[in-house]
Amino acid sequence: MATKDPLIGRTVRVLPDATTLKGQPHPKAGQQGTVQGRTPGGKQYQVLVGDDIVNLPMDAFEVHGTTTEPTEGNTLPLDALAPSRTNRPVANDEALQELAATIKLHGVLQPILVRKLPPERLQDTFESADTRHATHEIIAGERRWRAARIAGLRTIPVLIKDADAPRALTMQLVENLHRADLSPLDEAMGILRLIEEHGYTREQAADEIRKSRTHVYEALRLPGLCADALVAMRQGILKRSVALLVAQRPTPALQQEFTRKVLTGGPDNGPMSYRAALDLARRNYMTDLAQAPFALDDAALLPKAGACTQCPKRTGAAPELWDKQGADVCTDTACFADKKDAHYAHITLQAKARGRKVITGAEAREIMPTEGVAPTGYILLDKPRKGDTEPLRTLLGDEVPEGKIVLIEAPSGAMVEAVPTRAAGAVLEARGKAAKPQAAPKTGEPTREELETEYQRRWRGAAINAVIDNLQNDPQDIDTLPPAVAQRFILSEAREASDEFLRSIFSLPPMFDDDALAEATRRIAEMGHKTQMLAMLMVAATADAEPHFNRPINEALQLEAIAPIAGVDLAAIKAQAQQEMKAEAAERAGTTAQPDTAKPAIKPKGKGKAGAESKTTAAEAQAAIAQAMAAADGINAFAPGQTVRVRIDLKNASGHLLPTKGTQAVITSKTGDRAWMLDIEDMPTGKGLIADYTELEAIDEAE
């Protein structure tokens, strides 16, 4: 809201030398009047002189009863001063007019800093009529000088400094840094001039302007922003903190794309907050190099990019610019993607050279539509199956023949190794493992480690639920936090908690995304101090749902600290978990102890105790595995014209699921190494369906 002009209502006298716009003596010169208001343009005042309203600039009248010219200290005529070429530009805006009105009443209360006009300024100051008589250059205080000219002052108080160009520039920067309206770009350009024009190092510049070295390093990145970001910064739309996130994008194209998103991705299609922009940068524009499938020191993988360990786009190359990001984070996601593609292309060539089957493109997406899910008809070698604790590669060791390993392109672009389900099942059966992907229930006694893990899981889950229940039903008096701070901590912890606990704490639906979680935490943070603290305690308790990696298995520091506040008896919960597990152990012992009276045990031939199983030699095991693998190949022995039964519901060419489970079909042809094309005569849409051989079973001719 604009403030009232201090000159309105004042009694003034039109100066004797006042002139009209045409340069003629003003007819009201020397007469008194009253300021009624300002003209629509705001540059002149409406003064009532007698019965007439006249428009006068501020320098054409004087305010009755005021003396604004300085009477003591060093002063210089206004036309003896020239503005600096290195200071930030001064806009002739409403704020400058208000400053001029204040100076008109009270004068310039604080001297401006000046230095003697340097020799290199003689030419350019002489060429301008406004500075032709200049003897000094303004270091700091140009706004006051310009406002004094508007107000009609003749002189201005000054402090004359003996300063060369670098010193004058430093003084300007220090002066401006204490102004609330200083543009981050103006500051950055001043620091850049200190370094480029006057030979300062970054450290020397930081010392001169009394800022940290990180602040200087960050500022020097701003002038190099893309055009859209620079324009948005000058307009005040793009804040410095978000602009620095733009600067962290290593290429102009990425900067342009990121700028567009942060300027339109916020509420009502406006700018994003810093936290939202940071989250966007971390999710979409930064990649942890620990996830790289290729060697970081391989400079030959993508010669134009070189090795990641030597890359300037890696956060570790400029640690002072990255806050807690780690030394191994890539900021050029396009380059990272190119390296992944090159790596997988190399792996594919190697696989084909070794005779392995490689599945890519549409066929790969059909059998593995989502990341992390086992492809249809295959078992991943390096991912444990549901019910297993170890991946298949560990279970099979080196006993899988090379020709059985298949390379499949995952949705992420990675190439994963797998073996056919039937072949793997046959091998596992030969080794005494489960023949089906689902693990058979364990019948023996669990190990001590398994019991300890189960005990920890049980009491921790029970304790967290008790904390949540008690804090919700019997809240304590807790100090408050600002909503923004509270949400930051709540959301940060919540993103690490399990969905099950989060649904209970925040009343979320069964399926929720990060946006829903963020909105729920925002509402909680705005509900007051007690609700904030309760939510923080409940979410913090979930951190101990499982034992932490590389820590004592019985350590649960969060739960131990929060349980007394929530009135939860951890000792009682632990005792209850122990009793339940003892009862289950007793039940297992009773079940497994029942003798098999139907079939007496047969004592094996050879040495050893009665009931002991005979050992298989390594040669016998390998022979059994090879035999099982060979038998698995015969399962796909279908032929065109054969009638088969469909095991599952198949999709048609449009991707729609058809009720084909249990129906009979006739094979028309083979497509690929594994799939068969078939027709279901009793179904109008059952022509040209494609099924994997594992989804079909032969029908006995007698059926």
Image (cartoon, grey):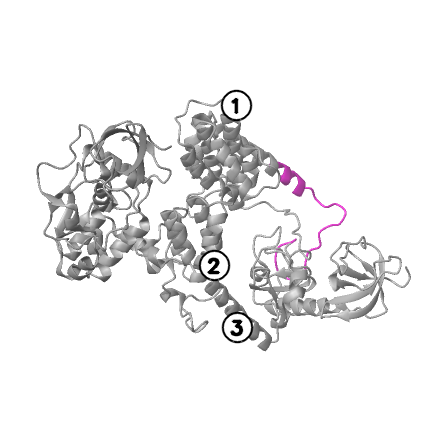
In three-dimensional space, the C-alpha distance between marks 2 and 3, rounded to whole angstroms, equals 18 Å
What kind of element bears circle 2?
helix
- Comes first in the chain, label 3 or label 1: 3
Q: Nearer the viewer, residue 418 or 688?
A: 688
In three-dimensional space, the C-alpha distance between marks 3 and 1, rounded to whole angstroms, equals 60 Å
Side of 337 where 40 appears, left or right: left
Q: Residue at x 42, y 22 (%)?
A: 477
- Comes first in the chain, label 2 or label 3: 2
Q: Nearer the viewer, residue 305 or 593?
A: 305
* Dominant secondary structure, magenta: loop
Segment colored magenta: 586-611
Q: Nearer the viewer, residue 681 or 92?
A: 92
What kind of element bears circle 3?
helix
Residue 613 position, x and y percent, is 64, 57
Amino acid type at mark 1: Asn
Residue 555 forms part of the magenta stretch: no
Residue 56 vs 33, above or below: the answer is: below
Q: Which residue is mark 3?
A: 346
Q: Which residue is mark 2?
A: 291
User: In the picture, residue 623 is in which quadrant?
Assistant: bottom right
Q: Residue at x 42, y 59 (%)?
A: 331
Residue 600 forms part of the magenta stretch: yes
